[in-house]
Image: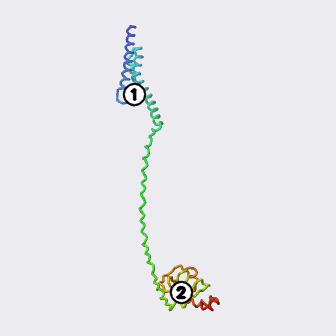
């Protein structure tokens, strides 16, 4: 009798282990379950196996398995709830994933418009009036009857043609007419305007030279009739 009980107990242990393994495999291969459902399933399987072993010791294998399964389901569900709550709190407390901001776009090239062309109006043409031509009449011809006579005037360092305002100085004849001094190779001309007469000529009184000769003629020259 004892031998049968021992064989029966060993057989129940194998059945319990088989149930536990089957429960674990079923829990892993079934559709996705929550943590509570997984805990209840695993607890029920373990409780059923444990209850079957205990029940076999007292001769009530089936009742022990049912009682163990019920207790295991409740205990597994409670444990699964605790684990699921801890997982949820851990997920809530975990910092959100850091998502790196995309790099800013590269700066656009600055396009500088060229300055508008500066149009400069050409300056107005400068109209230069042609120089006014001054027509100066040539001196009238000097007519000397007989041999020309020159009167020396020391104060002027020049000779004066008798009865005419013609001056002889430096191998040239000078004649003041029309506001200009004229120069010639002879007392009768031809005459040409001289813009820069010699200093001795430029200092002479202009016109009526004979009216000034008496003031500058020495007494000796006057007696000789040269002044």
Secondary structure at badge 2 equals strand
Q: Earlier in the sequence, mark 2 or mark 1?
A: 1
From the viewer's side, name the closer residue of 1 and 105: 105
Q: Which mark is residue 166?
A: 2
Taking the image as shown, residue 89 lies to the left or right of residue 150, namely left
> Is 110 situated above or below 191?
above
Q: What residue do we see at 42% from left, 69% from top? A: 122
Quarter occupied by residue 114: bottom left
Q: What residue do we see at 39% from left, 26% from top? A: 41
> Is 148 situated above or below 108?
below
Position of residue 129 measured from the top left corner of the image (x, y, whole percent): 44, 77
Q: Which residue is mark 1?
A: 38
Position of residue 123 measured from the top left corner of the image (x, y, whole percent): 43, 70
> Is 36 situated above or below 12?
below
> Is 166 situated above or below 61?
below
Disc 2 vs disc 1: which is toward the camera? Answer: 2
């Amino acid at each position: 009798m004892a031998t049968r009980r021992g064989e029966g107990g060993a057989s129940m242990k194998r059945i319990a282990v088989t149930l536990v393994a089957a429960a674990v495999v079923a829990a892993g291969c079934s559709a996705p379950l929550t943590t509570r459902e997984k805990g209840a399933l695993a607890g029920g399987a373990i409780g059923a196996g444990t209850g079957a072993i205990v029940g076999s010791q007292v001769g009530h294998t089936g009742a022990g398995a049912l009682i163990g399964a019920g207790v295991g389901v409740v205990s597994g569900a409670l444990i699964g709830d605790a684990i699921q709550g801890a997982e949820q709190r851990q997920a809530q407390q975990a910092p959100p994933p850091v998502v790196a901001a995309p790099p800013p776009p590269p700066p656009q090239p600055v396009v500088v418009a060229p300055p508008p062309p500066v149009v400069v109006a050409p300056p107005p043409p400068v109209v230069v009036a042609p120089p006014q031509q001054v027509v100066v009449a040539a001196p009238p011809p000097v007519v000397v009857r007989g041999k020309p006579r020159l009167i020396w005037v020391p104060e002027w360092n020049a000779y004066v043609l008798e009865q005419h305002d013609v001056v002889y100085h430096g191998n040239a004849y000078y004649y003041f007419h029309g506001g200009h001094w004229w120069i010639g190779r002879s007392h009768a001309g031809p005459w040409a305007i001289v813009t820069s007469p010699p200093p001795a000529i430029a200092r002479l009184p202009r016109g009526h030279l004979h009216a000034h000769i008496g003031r500058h003629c020495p007494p000796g020259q006057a007696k000789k009739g040269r002044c």
